[in-house]
Image: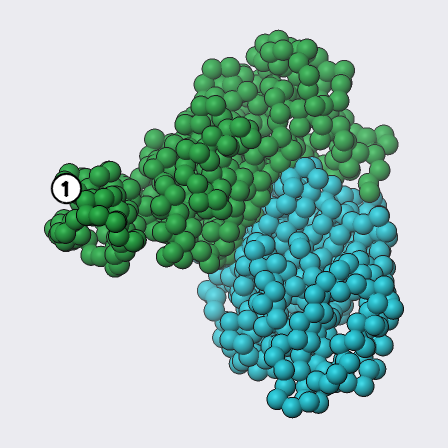
Chain colours: A cyan, B green
Amino acid sequence: MVKAVVNSPAPLKVGIAGLGVVGAGVVRLLDQHAGTLAARAGRPIKVVAVSARDRRKKRDMPKGSWRWYGDAADLAGDPDVDVVVELIGGADGKARALVEAALRAGKGVVTANKAMLAVHGAKIAALAEAHDAPLAFEAAVAGGIPIVKALREGLIGNRIDQITGILNGTCNYILTEMRNTGRDFGEVLKEAQQLGYAEADPSFDIDGVDAAHKLAVLTSLAFNTRVDFRAVHVEGIRHVSAVDIAFAREFGYRIKLLAIARRTPRGIEQRVHPCMVPADTPIAHVDGVFNAVSAVGDYVGRVMFEGRGAGSNPTASAVVADLADLAAGRRAPAFGVPAVKLQPLKAAAMADYIGRYYIRLIVRDQPGVLADVSAVLRDHKISIESLVQRGRSEAENQPVAVVFITHEAREADMARALKRIAKLRPVLQPPAPIRIETP
Amino acid sequence: MVKAVVNSPAPLKVGIAGLGVVGAGVVRLLDQHAGTLAARAGRPIKVVAVSARDRRKKRDMPKGSWRWYGDAADLAGDPDVDVVVELIGGADGKARALVEAALRAGKGVVTANKAMLAVHGAKIAALAEAHDAPLAFEAAVAGGIPIVKALREGLIGNRIDQITGILNGTCNYILTEMRNTGRDFGEVLKEAQQLGYAEADPSFDIDGVDAAHKLAVLTSLAFNTRVDFRAVHVEGIRHVSAVDIAFAREFGYRIKLLAIARRTPRGIEQRVHPCMVPADTPIAHVDGVFNAVSAVGDYVGRVMFEGRGAGSNPTASAVVADLADLAAGRRAPAFGVPAVKLQPLKAAAMADYIGRYYIRLIVRDQPGVLADVSAVLRDHKISIESLVQRGRSEAENQPVAVVFITHEAREADMARALKRIAKLRPVLQPPAPIRIETP
């Protein structure tokens, strides 16, 4: 629609470190939309150098006359690179060394590296400012959804009170498939691995670590606090079973791995864990590999953003948005305010969390078991809203599923109660609690 | 969380024209979050002048020591105003005069005026550029949702292929209430007027004009074309009846007033009309006064944004986001590319639209009527996917509702067929077609 610019101003010269699917996507996008981008950003964006371990590997991208470096660190030393795009990954090692060297050289850095930002974000932002070098990371959270820009600029007028996200596509895909097919976790995970939606070692995703990295970054943006990954309470989805999915449906809920950051009188809560969310809330309908982030601001109310959270093309879209900002001279403090103004995060203790719980037990079907469990809950001041036993076993002593839905209870009380319940003789598996959230 | 800046740099000096609920909201927000905003934007944002007809009117905002002007035009001449916020409204008249005068004086303009942008947008953007004055209008579309920034910056790397929006909260509220209560259009409209969700003269909203204004602006941003409001095909929701809502539910659809801009081989389609959307699509769940915009980009895929589309606080959030961009020195071409590069919009004729249709007829219950209608459709090469007659009247000749769902058909054929169907003797009301969309 827009023709290439004639006599265009000096291009923004880009060096890309890491030519996996995202890096190749960035090269492809910059090539395919070169003319439009130059018109939109005011100047061309040009890849001039790349770095990847294997130069001969087949890649889904056009060929270019860029300089090749075997060592990514050399990009930081290339005087003819304005911006380094870091797509190596990992909290430390080569990625961090490159980013710090580039910033020290006054180069801009665009990165998709949530692990690095979650662990070293505040320090890296301070380094960027000390050298007046822009630092941008739209691609680090929620793939193609422009949520970093939305929080940092679009919602700038708000005190943000809560962020709720579906930030890991692998988990959301698995939970959606479990719901759609009735199959159990292990089976669906195996299939997801075959389809390439889950890694061979899936723990990073399914144990909630990846979502927690992203949440820590969003928290900093939303509350202008120093990134504090260690303060995130993290639980994954391994213990979610087909039985839970079936109960959720029966009660009008869907199970989602939510990442939540919330302002409370006790400080800021950051937590990643499976949740029961009412089936009629918007976030309950975010299915498959899609991500979503909902933010509640004091002026804007609730806004929700939904889109693809990963993949070559959506992530490339986010990387290029950052590059275009740099090309156009649009700058913003990395985490919303200058690094020196980021406050230490006062973390609310998870033990003080208050909410409703779904507790599913597998128990031997025998008289008295429900009374025993109820008594433990009562002893810990946890009141029961409803109790469901699904079917009865053919004979006594067979395992059956029992679900308790509680009224609001304190996490510390619940933890103690569950420890005692786990020790009751007829309780056959450790109790699997899922918090009930209405985001 | 963030303390006020000591020794802060020079403030951005703001003049506000129009102190209705939005203007008061902007004053309130800038006052309440002054410290945080200064930290985030890098300098304070300060209201120094205002203009409103009635100075003594009670307003929900703090008092300030600003200069008062009876005539908004004087804001453009105040040398101590950096940015004029135009909240007067209307495509021409005082609003346009003020905006043009302010831009000519080199001042920034922030406006929520979709009517003005829809009619004069391209010209005003050119004027702004000629005077190197920033022009921003996040608040003009979808209230608090930062969709203008998302399209212009966040999705800058994409060729956008389609925009689908729920852009009018009044219509969405009415349609949602009709679905929730089973009541008819007129009754729900009356209630909406009592609740303040609809104007005394509601035609601007319910006839789709407001949504069309906003769509015209989004189209320009998405496709980098000159705003072309006259090319928008507009239908409102007056003819949607309780019967249609009931049929929609039965078929697994929800009725929404959608605003759609789409790239087709024939040009760009811009249309606002009621749609049947499958109940399991995300946009079907955007209810009440909420707005939503979904965009499909070639790299990002589909992204959706949802939030409050109107009201004092959400709109103030959007106005302040623009002010913060200006304070921070972040600039972007108003419609995504410099005005001179905006292409004339090549409009796809609505007559060539192809899609599936829901056609609800009220007919006298007598033998042969379905055959007659079917024959007309066949004559115009429209094939029927399904046909439902709900219940039968007690006696022959009583009115009953009949619904035809068609396969894909051409709009021009459909229009001709409907004209003939309307003339059939047993057809008691003009046929009410609703297009079926799967956005």
**SS for tag 1?**
loop
Q: Classify A108 as above or below B236.
A: below
Image point 29% across, 53% down: which residue? B391
Residue B42 spot, x, y in % from top left:
75, 36
Mark 1 Cα shell of 10 Å, populated few (<14), some (14-19), many (≥20): some
Task: Say which quarter of the image contains residue A232.
Answer: bottom right
Task: Decide which of B242, A95 is in the foreground and name it.
Answer: B242
Image x and y of residue B382, in percent: 19, 53
Instruction: Say whether residue B188 is left or right of residue A200.
Output: left
Residue type indicated by callout 1: Leu
Image point 69% across, 58% down: which residue?
A437
Q: Residue furthest top?
A: B70
Residue at screen point 26% across, 59% down: B386
| Residue situated in front as seen by the camera: A101 or A310 | A310
Specify whether residue B406 is in view: yes
Please determine whether, in this image, residue A322 is positioned above or below residue A39.
below
Residue at point 81% right, 86% down? Answer: A425
Measured as percent of width and height from the top left, residue B364 is found at: 20, 44
A290 vs A433, left or right, is left
Image spot of residue A213 (x, y percent): 72, 63
Q: Chain of mark 1?
A: B
| Image quadrant where one finds the N terminus of chain B | top right
Q: Which residue is mark 1?
A: B424
Is residue A22 visible from the viewing direction of this image? no
Total number of numbered labels? 1
What is the residue that sits farthest to the front in this orientation? B395
Q: Is B108 placed above or below A370 here?
A: above
Q: Nearer the viewer, residue B47 or B253?
A: B253
